[in-house]
Image (tube, helix red, strand yellow):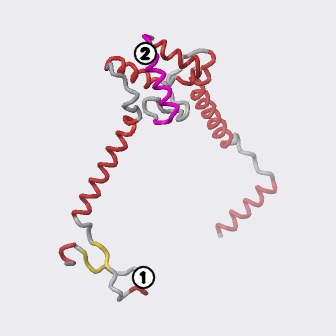
């Protein structure tokens, strides 16, 4: 039985356990290995499919053209609960409500821009994943570059201060002590 599973008696690292017959697997049985790989692959597929489950079948429009437009718009709108996730990917209740509103706007004959503008009028430009470059969004667009620039200036100033400039000359007492130490060390 042991030979079939590929197990053998292993040396015991703890001397107090010596002679108790502790066993360690030399290698994992192939069924366990294959099961582990299969479970990992299945988990990965579920994780990749999770965003696709956000849009419920009850939300979807019967017209495939309108549904495709609704999905495109939903990918451009931010879930205000999840913040960095589109409402198309989010399963938050508010994202569901926003997806329903988008579909209602499209059923009313509104254009894609009008449907987005309807939500912007209610939630502000924050609801857009890519807000327009305007004076009120300059900080949003330029803030990361400003922070990076300030960080670079800070690092430059720190490194420059570490150099310290020109060395300070030794006083007469310090020079005499240094000479004495060098002479003592050479003997």
Q: Which residue does the image show at 48% across and 22% down from the upper left?
A: 101
Closest to the observer, 172 or 32: 32
Which picture quadrant has residue 157?
Answer: top right
Q: Earlier in the sequence, mark 2 or mark 1?
A: 1
- Give the position of the N terminus as an image quadrant: bottom left
In the image, 39: left or right of 88? left
Q: Which residue is mark 2?
A: 106
Query: Is residue 93 a member of the stretch shown in magenta?
Result: yes
- Residue at image position (68%, 62%) is 182
Number of residues whose C-alpha sits closer than 10 Å to that of mark 2, classed few (under 14), some (14–19) or many (20 or more): some
Q: Position of residue 93 (x, y in %)?
A: 51, 34
Q: Which segment did they paint magenta?
A: 91-109
Q: Position of residue 178 (x, y in %)?
A: 73, 59
Q: Position of residue 73 (x, y in %)?
A: 43, 21
Secondary structure beneath disc 1?
Answer: loop
Q: Quadrant of the C terminus?
A: bottom right
Residue of label 1: 14
Most prominent secondary structure in the magenta stretch?
Answer: helix
As drawn, the residue found furthest toward the bottom would be: 19
Left or right: 8 as drawn, with respect to 51: left
Disc 2, disc 1: CB below 8 Å? no
* Residue 13 image-quadrant placement: bottom left
Q: CA distance from mark 2 to mark 1?
A: 71 Å
- Mark 2 or mark 1, whichever is nearer to me: 2
């Amino acid at each position: 039985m042991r030979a079939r599973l590929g197990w053998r008696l292993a040396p015991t690292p703890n001397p107090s356990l010596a002679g108790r017959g502790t066993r360690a697997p030399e290698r994992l049985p192939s069924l366990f290995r294959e099961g582990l790989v299969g479970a990992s692959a299945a988990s990965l597929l579920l994780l990749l499919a999770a965003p696709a489950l956000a849009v419920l079948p009850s939300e979807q429009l019967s017209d495939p053209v309108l549904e495709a437009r609704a999905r495109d718009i939903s990918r451009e709108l931010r879930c205000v609960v999840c913040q960095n996730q589109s409402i198309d990917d989010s399963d938050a209740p508010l994202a569901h409500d926003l997806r329903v509103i988008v579909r209602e706007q499209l059923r009313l004959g509104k254009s894609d821009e009008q449907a987005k503008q309807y939500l912007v009028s209610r939630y502000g430009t924050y609801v857009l994943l890519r807000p327009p470059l305007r004076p009120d969004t300059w900080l949003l667009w330029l803030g990361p570059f400003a922070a990076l620039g300030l960080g670079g200036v800070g690092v430059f100033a720190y490194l420059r201060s570490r150099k310290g400039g020109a060395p300070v000359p030794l006083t007469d007492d310090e020079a005499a002590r240094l000479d004495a130490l060098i002479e003592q060390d050479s003997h």
